[in-house]
Each structure stands twice: as structure tokens, then as C-alpha cells.
Amino acid sequence: MIRGLKIVMIIWAAVAILMGLVYIFFPNQLNEIGGYEGSDLATYVLALLGICYIAAGAFVILAALDPLKHIRWVQFAIAVAFLTVAVAGSSIGRGLVTFSQEGIPLIFNAVFAIALLALYPYQKVKGK
């Protein structure tokens, strides 16, 4: 079970790092694909968000080496995945973005939030 948790954490974090790099180095292409009109400020904000994704992903990968020792990073990954689903769902529901623009991140994070919760070492954390 811990091995599965490690794998899920590493995959989730690797995708976060890749997205962070895309946000930093290819913001205009990302805006075109998503159908957004980007300003210089939006490009800057995407780069800042990219930095956050890279840093978080790196720490989650490091935590995946020993998830029990770094259980707060497991909880962090679960929280970020669920909050991403909530914000994407809310933004789609309010018409700020379309499902075609934010559906993939919503589905990806929902799957990983559920997987992280399913593999979470409840008994081992409780018995610490």
C-alpha cells in the first residue's frame, strides 16, 4: 500500500512539475490551446504559478521517498488535488471557464485525490 502511495505521489508531482515548466516557458502556447487571451500580467502570473507547481512537486517527490515520515506532504498533495477540483468545478459552474478548458485538470486531480485518499496509511499514521 505504501508502495502504491509513493507511485501515485511521484506521478502527481511529476505532472505538477511539467505543468509548472509549461506555465513558465510556454505561456502563450498554453493560452492559445486553452482559448484564453493573455496579457503580460497574465503571463507573469502564470510564471509565478509555475514556480509554485515546480516547488510543490519537488517536495512531494522527496516526501514520496518516505511518506510516513513526511505525512504532512501527503496531506498537502491531497488538499491541493481536492482544492483544484473544487476551484475548477466552481469556475466551470459559474461560467468563468468551459469544461473543455479546465476539464482535464479537474478530472486528473479528482482521480489523484481519490487515489491518494485510498492509499493513505490511516492505521500507520494513527499508531505513530
Image (cartoon, rainbow, N blue to C red):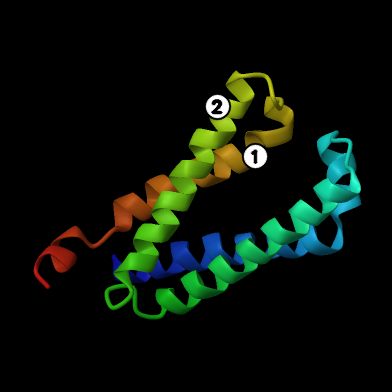
Residue assigned mark 2: 90
Q: Quadrant of the N terminus?
A: bottom left
Q: Residue furthest front?
A: 41
Q: Residue furthest left?
A: 127
* Of the image marks 1 and 2, the number of the one nearer the N terminus: 2
Whether residue 58 is situated above or below residue 35 in the rendered picture: below
| Camera sees residue 4 | no
Residue assigned mark 1: 104
- In the displayed structure, does residue 125 sit left or right of residue 11? left
At 14% from the left edge and 62% from the top edge, which residue is drawn?
123
Whether residue 40 is situated above or below residue 68 in the rendered picture: above
Whether residue 111 is situated above or below residue 73 in the rendered picture: above
- In the displayed structure, does residue 39 sit left or right of residue 70? right
At 55% from the left edge and 27% from the top edge, which residue is drawn?
90
Q: Quadrant of residue 8?
A: bottom left
- The location of residue 50, given as percent across then percent down, is 70, 61
Which label is found at residue 5? none
- The location of residue 60, given as percent across then percent down, is 48, 70
- The location of residue 55, given as percent across then percent down, is 59, 70
At 42% from the left edge and 74% from the top edge, which residue is drawn?
64
Depth check: 4 or 84 in front?
A: 84
Cα distance between the residues tagged 1 and 2: 14 Å
1 or 2: mark nearer the eye = 2
| Camera sees residue 98 | yes
